[in-house]
C-alpha cells in the first residue's frame, strides 16, 4: 500500500496523531487532493484525509460547506473532479461486495409498507447471512433504540424521530466495516443522542468498525470520542492545539 495520507493542511502533527500514524498499517478510508464541484461551483477542494479501523470521525461545519458531499464521494454516489478516494482498498464501487462492508444512513429510505419494525430488522440481518462480524439482533436493537412499543408497527405509522431510530438500527442489524452517517442526530432527543454516541463508541468502533459522520452537534461528537474535522469554504480547517 502507498504512503499514509493524513490532513496535510494541518500546520503540525500532534504526538497523538504521530502514534496513530505509526500504528495503522491499512487505512479504511484514504482521500488525497479531493476536489468536487457542481458545474462551476467548487464544493470541496484540497481534501486530504485518512481514517483507520476502529476510529470515529465527525465532519462539522455550517450548512452547504460540503459535509454531505464528502460522504457522497466516500459512498461512490458522486465522482470527484480531481484527486483520489480509496475505501477499503479501492475506489468506491456500486456492487454487492462493497455494500456488504459499507452501511450508509442519510435520507430515510423507502419503507416496505407490509413489514413491521421487527420484520424489517430481521430482513436486513437475513439478507446478510452468514453473519460473520459484529452486529445486534433485532430484539436487542428494538430495545436499545427505544422501539419496543412500536416493534409490530409499520414504519409509516411512526414519528420522524422513531423512523430515524429505525434507520440507524437497520444499519447496525448487519455487519459492516464502515458506517457513513449524514446528520444521524436529526430528530433525536438529547438523551438518545448520548446513547447513540455510546453505542458507536463502545460497541461498533470497539469491535473494529469505522464511523465517518457529518454532524452539527459538537456535544454528540465529543460524546462519541470522535476526531473532529471542521470544513470551511470547502477546505479542512487546520488543527490547532486546542483541538488536539
Image (tube, grey):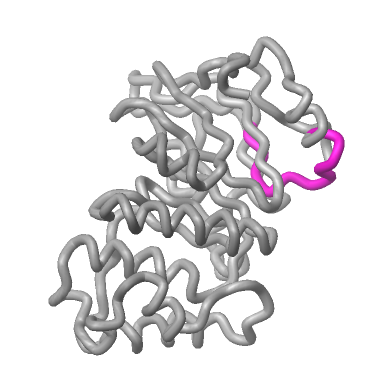
46 in relation to 32, above or below: above
Above or below residue 54? Residue 10 is: above
Closer-to-camera residue (45/182): 182
Residue 68 visible, this orientation: no
Foreground: 38 or 217? Answer: 217
Whether residue 235 is in magenta: the answer is: no
Residue 102 visible (yes or no): yes
Query: Quadrant of the image for the C terminus?
Result: top right
What is the x, y in percent for residue 181?
43, 51
* Horizontal side of residue 95 vs 30, given as left or right: left
Q: Is residue 126 left or right of residue 41?
A: right
Of the pair 32 and 56, the residue shown nearer to us: 56
Q: At 51% from the left edge and 17% from the top edge, which residue is drawn? A: 237
Q: Which residues are magenta?
A: 21-31
Question: Residue shown at 30%/50% (left/top)?
Answer: 190
Residue 30 drawn above or below residue 130: above
What percent of the width, then of the height, locates residue 71?
46, 43
Q: Nearer the viewer, residue 196 or 89?
A: 196
Q: Is residue 27 above or below residue 160?
A: above
Left or right, 18 with reference to 235: right
Report the residue at 78% width, 24% height from top. 15
Looking at the rendered structure, the number of numbered marks drawn on it comes to 0
Position of residue 123 measured from the top left corner of the image (x, y, whole percent): 42, 86
Amino acid at each position: 500500500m502507498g504512503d499514509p495520507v493524513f490532513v496535510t493542511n494541518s500546520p503540525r502533527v500532534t504526538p497523538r496523531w504521530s502514534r496513530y500514524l505509526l500504528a495503522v498499517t491499512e487505512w479504511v478510508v484514504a482521500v488525497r487532493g479531493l476536489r468536487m464541484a457542481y458545474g462551476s461551483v467548487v464544493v470541496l477542494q484540497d481534501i486530504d484525509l485518512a481514517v483507520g479501523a476502529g476510529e470515529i470521525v465527525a465532519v462539522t461545519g455550517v450548512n452547504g460547506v460540503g459535509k454531505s458531499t464528502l460522504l457522497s464521494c466516500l459512498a461512490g454516489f458522486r465522482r470527484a473532479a480531481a484527486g483520489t478516494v480509496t475505501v477499503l482498498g479501492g475506489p468506491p464501487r456500486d456492487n454487492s461486495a462493497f455494500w456488504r462492508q459499507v452501511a450508509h444512513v442519510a435520507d430515510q429510505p423507502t419503507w416496505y409498507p407490509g413489514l413491521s419494525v421487527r420484520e424489517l430488522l430481521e430482513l436486513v440481518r437475513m439478507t446478510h447471512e452468514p453473519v460473520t462480524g459484529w452486529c445486534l439482533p433485532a430484539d436487542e436493537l428494538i430495545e436499545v433504540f427505544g422501539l419496543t412499543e412500536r416493534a409490530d408497527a409499520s414504519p409509516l405509522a411512526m414519528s420522524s424521530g422513531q423512523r430515524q431510530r429505525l434507520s440507524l438500527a437497520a444499519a447496525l442489524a448487519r455487519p459492516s466495516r464502515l458506517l457513513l452517517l449524514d446528520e444521524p442526530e436529526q430528530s433525536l432527543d438529547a438523551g438518545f443522542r448520548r446513547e447513540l454516541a455510546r453505542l458507536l463508541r463502545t460497541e461498533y468502533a470497539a469491535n473494529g468498525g469505522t464511523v465517518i459522520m457529518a454532524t452539527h452537534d459538537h456535544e454528540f461528537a465529543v460524546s462519541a470520542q470522535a476526531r473532529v474535522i471542521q470544513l470551511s469554504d470547502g477546505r479542512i480547517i487546520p488543527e490547532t492545539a486546542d483541538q488536539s
